[in-house]
Amino acid sequence: MKSRLRKDITNLPNTLTGIRLAFIPPLFIFLNFQGRWTSFFAALVFGLASITDILDGYFARKHGTVTVLGKFLDPLADKLLISITMIMLIPLDRIPVWMVIVIIAREMAVTGLRGIAVSEGIVIQAGTLGKYKTIFQSSAIAGLCLHYSYFDVDFHVVGMVLLWAALALTLWSGWEYFRQFKQVFFPEK
């Protein structure tokens, strides 16, 4: 048991997930200071963390190293990274608080539904909409971290446009989870 857990912890996908979690403290530090450079480094750290999300899933599937630990840690790391960053952007006036509340509430609700389903031996897989939601959320947050204009591109505006798209996908994919949950647990007769 211990050797299997040790092997699970040290496999490449789970190591990448651990690295994603390790990016959160520097991101937190950069977002505590306003300025072009700290915003740039916050966006860079967030971008690198987001890339580990893509890579861990790719390597887990490619090498057949999908583990129970990874199935738990990967979505947890994603939710922590996204939620903490959005919360940190609120006092900087870079993101509306109501959008953060809606997005985090959806994440908690879907996580709860999936947890109930798993307790009954049913897996509700992440759908394509959820993957697009994550891409748009991550892109929006990177733009909002950058915030300033670079090369005549106002990254705050870009981030907000992407965030509106992410919000729509967040609500749509959340509705899809609820619909799947209802079909499984309360089928129409």
Image (spheres, rainbow, N blue to C red):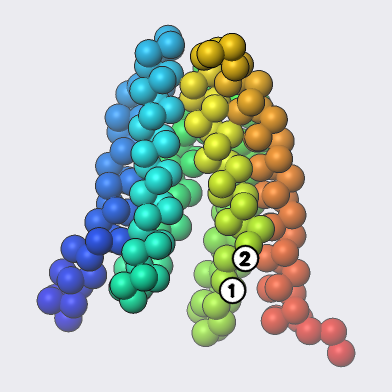
- The spot of residue 100 in percent (x, y) is 61, 36
* Residue 52 visible, this orientation: yes
Q: Residue furthest right?
A: 189
Q: CA distance from mark 1 to mark 2?
A: 9 Å
Where 157 falls versus 10 (above or below)? above
**Residue at x 25% of width, y 56% of height:** 15
Q: Position of residue 48 (x, y in %)?
A: 36, 39
Q: Is residue 14 above or below residue 122?
A: above
* In front of the other: 80 or 18: 18
Dividing the picture into quadrants, the one containing residue 28 is: top left
Residue type for callout 1: Ile
Residue 55 horizontal side relative to residue 126, left or right = left
Helix, strand or loop at mark 1: loop
The quadrant holding residue 84 is top left
Give the label on residue 110, or none.
none
Q: Is residue 86 above or below residue 12?
A: above
- The residue tagged 2 is 127
Crowd rating for badge 2 (residues with CA inside 10 Å; few <14, some 14–19, many 20+): few
Residue 93 shows in this picture: no
Q: Nearer the viewer, mark 1 or mark 2?
A: 2
Residue 64 left/right relative to 124? left
Left or right placement of residue 179 versus residue 97 in this view: right
* Residue at the spot of label 1: 124
* Relative side of 183 to 45, left or right: right
Identify the amino acid type marked 2: Gly
Outermost residue toward the bottom in this view: 189
Q: Give the residue displayed 67% in from the left and 49% down from the top.
A: 170
Q: Secondary structure at mark 2?
A: loop
Task: Please identify the quadrant where the C terminus is shown.
Answer: bottom right
